Image: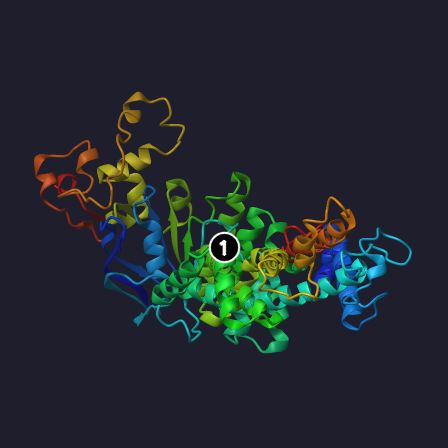
Amino acid sequence: MKKTKENATKGGFHYYFQSKSGVIGAVLLFLMVAGSICAAFGWLPHNPLDQNVDHILKGPSGKFWFGTDQFGRDIFSRTLDGMRRSLTVSITSVSIAALIGIPLGILGGYLGRWFDVFVTRMSDALFAFPAILLALAIVSSLGTAWYDTAISIGIVYTPIFIRVARGPVLATKEADYIKVSRILGYSSPRILIKHILPNVTAPIVVQIALSLSWAILTESGLSFLGLGTQPPDASLGLMVSDAQSLAALAWWTLVFPSLFITIVVVGLNLVGDGLRDAWDPARRSS
Amino acid sequence: MTLLIENVEKQYKVRASGLQINALNGISITLGKGSTLGIVGESGCGKSTLARVISGLEKPTSGGITWEGEGIVDKAKNHLRPKRSRVQLVFQDPYSSLNPRQQIGAAIAEVITVHKLRPKNAVSARVEELLSIVGLASDLQHRYPHQLSGGQRQRVSIARALAAEPDLLILDEPVSALDVSVRAEVMNLLIDLREKFNLTYIFISHDLGMIRYISDVIAVMYLGKVVEFGDWETIIEKPLHPYTRALINAMPDHSVIGNPETLSKTLQGEVPDPAHMPSGCAFHARCPIAVPACTTNTPVLLEMSSSHFVACPEVAR
């Protein structure tokens, strides 16, 4: 009894760190972000662009922790720099998609009628194109700067957020407690913000975490096709695609960037799980 | 001062098939302040639709509802201006009628603050008062709905409705989803509250036993129509309409069980589809005393006494 009262006064962070997956995810993500920040400030053992003909395709050593690539560039430095670029693009693109898609989906589901028809048809139209093809088309008309890539991925992901937000709103709108709110005379904005939103956040949060990891992969795909990050700059996806032909000869060129992609994706998913658990009072272990 | 329901009809269009569902087919009921109307009928007879229409949640297709001379606020339309309704509704399912992300104290306090029913510093005292009125400890206010039992949740729903200080409380099967062991407690609570706050109730149930326990007057509904209406003693002891008789015969009562004569009188068949209303009397296909005229003539409520109305010319004769 006393415990319930105490918990009620503590914030969401308290619940977040009760979940094991949340803690592990946060640690993984913290390491990745810290590495990216180091790269952003240039705190790296080597310049990621410096070529060194004396050290072509050397394995991991004390000097080159993750080995070197076919131009003798330090893979550790390039991986951290690529991480920075990949995270920047994926966070920007998912922010664009979420900021446009979530409000449209929620309003479409709540208001219904012509607005909902307009929103769903628009997202259907975007869904009709294969994601990478649409991103290619947009990026080739915009340019190849990192923000062009982010915008194109953002547009491609917008309909996903429209759907993820709209479905739960449609279901929650029909719940008895929403009908009660209406009979109690609450205004529409109040019902939407205080009663519908808290009950649809869980799938949206999970979707954000998942999309961040997909965006990293999409960015790699675009880079692979020559439209994302341009050589000699590094991005995780570009490094993996460059390493394809070298993997048999020098495993470290493929393994380290792939490993970092995996860690980010797993970390983001765990954070998504942790947030979902912290948000849902019924899942809180108290 | 009364609740006046005049010739209310409600139809739903099924968009896919173009069919029209006739949920309410001309309901007229008058109910005096402070008394309790019990509405009984099978699933699909329009009981819950009537509850939603009276509460203002849905607009009737035609007909009018007034409470003490005022129209019931149309909540479907007026949704930007918060207006406290004097009619509140308690739903059947205590699991879906509370917001799972809102502590119950906050849910009750919200009603008070939105309508400014108490000064800010008196809100929490009022929440505790309402909780104690419905028999809940005040330290439950920091709990989430999933931490409460069904009976406790239903008490919270009642407290939240009372927070709006209503005159008329519609109870849509308020105890049907509860354990049998807590039903009686909630029923007694409702009866106490009615006296304490001079409330008028509309109590909806498919269980005549519950209806008899709480009601002053009873309306028996069949396929969107009232087929018999009157004081509870009259309806229970001298039912006239063959449908009411069948419902009373179906009550699990010791005097009835094992009596082959009464068991054979229980109803056969299903309620007709409200998208294809039968001609004449809606009940004729299942009626044990139907005559050929029943398939063509639509019965109206006939006055048997000042407190007893029945929609069946065969028994009225």
Q: What residue lies at 32% left-to-right and 32% top-to-bottom?
A: B249
Q: Residues within 10 Å of mark 1 (few under 14, many from 20)?
A: many
Q: Is residue A244 left or right of residue B70?
A: right
Residue B315 placement (x, y as % from top left): 16, 39
> Looking at this rendering, what residue extends furthest in the right direction?
A62
- Is residue B4 visible in the rendered image? The answer is yes
Label 1 SS: loop
Residue B1 appears in which quarter of the rendering?
bottom left
Q: Eyeballing the image, is B111 above or below A23?
A: below
Q: What residue lies at 27% left-to-right and 61% top-to-bottom?
A: B60
Along the viewing direction, whichever of A10 and A161 lies nearer the viewer: A161
Q: Is residue B312 left or right of residue A81?
A: left
Q: Eyeballing the image, is B67 above or below A217?
A: below
Q: Which residue is mark 1?
A: B97
Residue A6 placement (x, y as % from top left): 75, 60
Residue B225 placement (x, y as % from top left): 24, 49
Residue B127 placement (x, y as % from top left): 60, 66
